[in-house]
Amino acid sequence: MAPSWKKLFLLSVLGVALNTVAQVSMRPEVAKHLQAAQVAIQSNQPEVAIQKIQEARFTPQLTEEEMMVLERLSVVAAMNAQKFDLAARSLDYLLQSQKLTAADRLSLTETMVGLSQRNKDHAKVVQWARRYAQEGGKNQSIRIMKLQALVLQGLHKEVLQDMFEVRSSVGYLAQEAELRIYAFSQKQLKDDAGYLTTLTQLVTRFPSKDYWSDLLNIMGRAPGINARMQLDLSRLMEASDTMQEGEDYLDTAQFAIKSGLPHEALRVLNQGQASGLVKDALAANASKLKQQAQQRAAEDDKALHLLNVASDNGPMLAQLGDVLLSMGQWHEAAEVYQKALSKGGLKREGEARLHCGIALIKLKQTEAAKSMLQSVTGDAFYEQMATLWISLAK
């Protein structure tokens, strides 16, 4: 979250202003008013300070040095009095000076950005934030203020242009607030691919149930997603603790049955019933699904001996690995997948590597799991799934 305008103000103006009156050579008739203003500020009497500063303004032929001190104190007093227009005018004067040091100019510009945000002057927030960046400012909070101001003006294309420019910077790592703004603008512009990429970054770097739910829901609606892929998405829902509706359990069971994995359907249905979420009308549907899964599981148990672990057939071994994974036999599944991969000839090698990685995660063999998941290539869906599982591997 970006710091408040008050924090920016205190950091960049207050200390400088209150130490300047005694340090700058000025005429006594000016100094007496500004010293009185300084005392009033320190006594939390901003209105008195503003009056004293105004009296100083009436002094004929103020020098630039006197004006700089006067306007600094004016910023402090005006902001304490919440007279933000006056503060902005004083800041604008200060920022036009050619005598500011680079560091002082940056800190004052930060204050101007925060003040513009406080005044809800979104165009000025963008203007001053861009100037801040041009002068070498690195505070990411200022960038976030700029992005927020662009969004509030509906300038989503400019947000994404900013995103592309920043991502090309070596070593730059966006904060969570930035990624949230990027995702919002991508969604407004119907940039589905970009939105998915940004959500993936949010999930992997700043995991939360909301991010996981949004990401997996979007992936589940993508064109070409079949039951096997939906089942893998449901496994991620379970691993990320985002199965929060009774329908989630029933849907997962249906995907498992369609994928020829009734044992997994039974396990998920039992979990759903134990959670208390599968109730009322869902309970009747769950009972029907359970009967169907039990019947198919019995049939599978009879045919399981046909899938021989000693086989030299890679695809058959991968199929056996899927069955063992669905039954929660992680160690056996990992061994069979690894053998299947060594034999080769797999039509869905990326899927097999993903599933082997999942089995290794379940076995808490983290490094081996990451290595296997990092080897998933050639299929965008399974590559993304592997990335997400890596983020869960601990």
Image: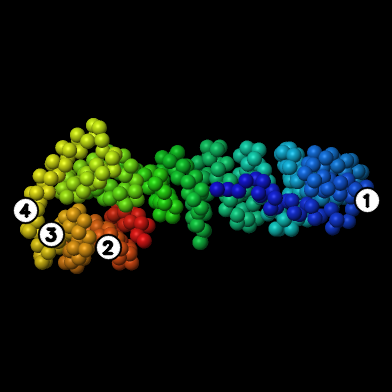
Q: Please name the amino acid that badge 3 sits on.
A: Met
| Quadrant into which the C terminus falls | bottom left
Q: Position of residue 249 (x, y in %)?
A: 26, 42
Q: CA distance from mark 2 to mark 4?
A: 27 Å
Q: CA distance from mark 4 to mark 3?
A: 16 Å
Badge 1: residue crowd in 10 Å (few <14, some 14–19, many ≥20)? few
The residue indicated by pointer 3 is: 316
Residue under the image location 76 percent in, 54 percent down: 16
Query: Quick one: label 4 or label 3, which is nearer the N terminus?
Result: 4
Q: Please name the amino acid that badge 1 sits on.
A: Pro
Badge 4: residue crowd in 10 Å (few <14, some 14–19, many ≥20)? few
For the residues carrying marks 1 and 2, which lies nearer the camera in this image? Answer: 2
Badge 2: residue crowd in 10 Å (few <14, some 14–19, many ≥20)? some
Direction from residue 78 to residue 238 in the image, left or right = left
Query: Quick one: label 1 or label 2, which is nearer the N terminus?
Result: 1
Q: Position of residue 163 (x, y in %)?
A: 50, 50
The residue indicated by pointer 2 is: 363
- Report helix, strand or loop for mark 1: helix
Direction from residue 212 to residue 270 in the image, left or right = left
